[in-house]
Image (cartoon, rainbow, N blue to C red):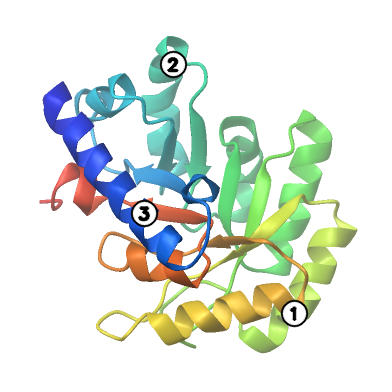
Amino acid sequence: MPLHDAASQLATIHQSIARAAILAQREPGDVTLIAVSKTQEAAAIEPLLEAGQRHFGENRVQEAQDKWPALRAAYPDVVLHLIGQLQSNKAEDAVALFDVIHAVDRPSLVTALGAAMRKTGKHPLCFLQVNIGDEPQKGGCAIADLPALLDAAQAAALPVAGLMAIPPADSDAAPYFALLAKLARRHALTGLSMGMSSDYETAVTIGATHVRIGTALFGARS
């Protein structure tokens, strides 16, 4: 992606976020744009870095370990988000590499992350993932299990930033975003990681603080 294309794409998305935020009487600066760079080579990421983008999302620990150390050497102010499912045995690697972990969804992972944070002295922010559409194939805790998961995260001294969810595909996302926002308010959490390329404007109007944009920045994955 040439630099001028990257800058143009970024500007377009930031304008859309700003419009949605203003519509909801929010500050556009309260919304963090995460560029989802999973499966993208460094050559595709560098134009966005040069255009000023600093928050990036990866799905897999191993892929991020291979790709980001060199990029971060050139851009040390990058904030790296793990947005995919995390195996408990990769918790220490994730804590060492990432600044934010978005898919904390079960007590065993909470335990592993707590141990990794104590060992490494690093404390990435954590979002608790909720299976907002009660889909068996998706990660995330059941809505009924959220209070217990939050208690476990607080007991393990995880820095909980808020909640994360992915609504069911091919459904109106708005009711699911509204439900996640309601759950966050109920538990006095301010962070909401929700909204992707197809629905981020809706997410922003409902309170998203972090939107995860891949296709709209990088194009459709092959």
Amino acid type, residue under disc 1 in the picture? Arg
**Which mark is in front, 2 or 1?**
1
Earlier sequence position, callout 2 versus callout 1: 2
Earlier sequence position, callout 1 versus callout 3: 3
Question: Which element type, helix, strand or loop, lies under badge 1?
Answer: helix
- Decide which of 147, 51 is in the foreground and name it: 51
Q: Residue 17 carries which label?
A: 3
Q: Kindly report the distance in space between the C-alpha atoms of the residues bearing marks 2 and 3.
A: 24 Å
- Name the residue at 45% across, 29% down: 65
- Decide which of 201, 44 is in the foreground and name it: 201
Question: Which element type, helix, strand or loop, lies under badge 2?
Answer: loop
Q: Residue 186 carries which label?
A: 1
- Name the residue at 36% across, 25% down: 52
Q: In this view, does 159 lie above or below 169?
A: above
Residue 150 falls left or right of residue 64: right
Extreme-top residue of the structure: 74
Residue 36 falls left or right of residue 105: left
Circle 2/circle 1 CB separation < 8 Å: no
